[in-house]
Amino acid sequence: MLRRLAGLIPAAPDRPLHVLDVGGGYGAVSAEVLERWPAAHVTLHDYSEAMVSAATERLGRYGSRVTYRLADMNERDWADRLGGPFDAVVSAMAIHNVEEPELIERVYGDIFGLLRPGGALLTMDLLFPASQGLAELYRRDPTRRHNWDVRVNPADAESHLRWLRRAGFSEVDCVWKDLELGLLWALRAA
């Protein structure tokens, strides 16, 4: 799935790209981007020094193609520490950690401001069920592999798409979804 996420960045394979990995953790998404896009430079963001340290070790072979930034998405000025503008922003299993719907919507607005016109956000994350009935349905699925608890939350897929539109993105879609796990696409108009 991370390969799919990296492959959906809207650019020609040989074009130099500046990509931000939000909540990049130990660097799994960054590694996929750097492999898929040989002319890419990735800025890996996380709030945890331990995770950035693990990413530095994992991504060391990419040398100067990677920079690292510490910032907490819960803080209003987090995006000011990241640089930019970026051609694309990627993220996996990170944005839901800010938990509050108002903060998630603000983070999307901050990301919009970091993107160049024509840039895209691709985020794979938890898209919680909006009702108890859906939560029960998700829990019953015998093929479900995820080990986290399914809970009803106002941060469902429709809400994320609405928040992305309100942030200013012109095209938004949930391009893949499996129960509560989904891949969102959002384009900043050129």
Image (cartoon, rainbow, N blue to C red):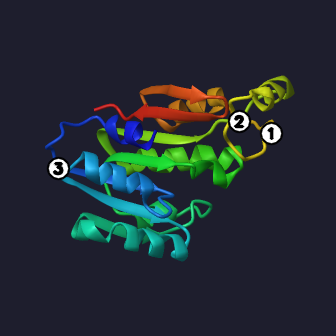
Looking at the image, tell me whether mark 3 or mark 2 is earlier in sequence order. Answer: 3
Residue that lies at the very extreme toward the left in this rendered image: 14
- The quarter in which the C terminus is drawn is top left
Give the crowd class for mark 1: few <14, some 14-19, many >=20 residues within 10 Å. some
In the image, residue 31 sits, relative to residue 131, either above or below, namely below
Q: Secondary structure at mark 3?
A: loop
**148 is higher (above) or lower (below) than 74:** above
Mark 2: which amino acid?
A: Phe
Dot placed on the residue nearer the N-terminal end, 1 or 3? 3
x, y percentage for residue 131?
82, 27
Q: Quadrant of residue 28?
A: bottom left
Q: Residue at x 39, y 68 (%)?
A: 58
Q: Give the number of the mark in front: 1 or 3.
A: 1
Q: Are marks 3 and 2 in contact (CB under 8 Å)?
A: no
> Which numbered disc covers residue 151?
1
| Secondary element at image label 1 | loop
Kindly identify the residue that appears in the image at 74 percent across and 27 percent down: 141
Residue located beneath label 3 in the image: 16
| Place of residue 161 in the rendered image (x, y in percent of width and height, measured from the top left) | 56, 29
Q: Nearer the viewer, residue 21 or 159?
A: 21
**Residue for badge 2:** 128
Front residue of 125/35: it is 35
Disc 3 to disc 2, C-alpha distance = 35 Å
Calculate the distance from the C-alpha at mark 1 to the C-alpha at mark 3.
41 Å
SS class of the residue under badge 2?
loop
The amino acid sitting under disc 1 is Arg
Q: Residues within 10 Å of mark 3 (few under 14, many from 20)?
A: some
Contact? badges 1 and 3 (CB < 8 Å): no
Q: Are marks 1 and 2 in contact (CB under 8 Å)?
A: yes
Can residue 86 be seen?
A: no
- Numbered mark located on residue 40 in the image: none
